[in-house]
Image (tube, helix red, strand yellow):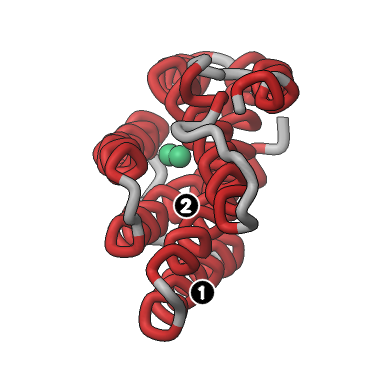
Amino acid sequence: MNTDNLHNLLYEALETEIGGIAVYSTALKCAQNDDLKKEWQEYLEQTKNHERIVRSVFEQIGLDPSVETPGRLVVRHVGESLVKAMEMAKSSAPPEAAQIVAGECVVFAETKDHLNWELIGLAAKKATGDTKKALKEAYDEVEDEEDEHLYHTTGWTRELWIESLGMPAVLPPPEEQKDVKTAIGAARAKNARGDMT
Ligand SMILES: [Fe+2]
Ligand SMILES: [Fe+2]
């Protein structure tokens, strides 16, 4: 295990969760659909909890959460750009279009978040001692929620686009109706959407 890069990953994961709070707070201002608002409000609360969980991993393995790494600066830049993109849409586009932009921005943010936790899960299997324990406990608490954040919001964004194109949309999306938590489940749910419209 390359410990330096495991630490780099953890700094990026912390920054992703911090940025995620700003992304959801802004996305909520763009949300129009009540079910979507409810969903993102829940994800915002979960993301705040994820930040606490990552900070507790830092404590358990003796990492200083205030250290700036090149990787976390990149993650912060991307997060701030996503917030700016949503603000741009909110001030210049119709509300329905700004809502779709927010969906796309959440998917961008959650793609990174999901990758971080997938890697943390793999690292937890290889690690030993206190590091293994800290990573595994954090992963077990977070992973299911990250699956929902990514797959359900991807579904929302696709269906909101479909609706805006004047075609029959499935809202809430099949990923949410079928409570999808895996990539295979997401593919199946998307495949079944034709029968749901
Ligand atoms: Fe998260
Ligand atoms: Fe997330």
User: In this view, which residue lies farthest toward the bottom?
Assistant: 92
Q: Is mark 2 within 8 Å of ligand 1?
A: yes
* Mark 1 Cβ inside 8 Å of ligand 2: no
Q: Is residue 122 left or right of residue 12?
A: right
**Residue at which label 2 appears:** 16
Quarter holding ligand 1: top left
- Type of amino acid under label 2: Thr
Who is closer to the viewer here, 35 or 77?
A: 35
Task: Residue 192: give x, y in percent of width and height.
Answer: 69, 19
Residue tagged by mark 1? 81
Which circle marks residue 70 in the picture?
A: none
* Residue visible at 57% across and 39% down in the picture: 169
Q: Describe residue 54's horizontal placement relative to residue 119 as left or right.
A: left
Task: Identify the residue at image location x=57%, y=43%.
Answer: 159
In x, y percent, where is residue 149? 47, 35
* Relative horizontal placement of residue 118, taking residue 66 as reference (left or right): right
Toward the viewer: 130 or 193? 193
Q: Amino acid at mark 1?
A: Ser
Estimate the x, y position of residue 138 in percent, counting from the top left: 41, 23
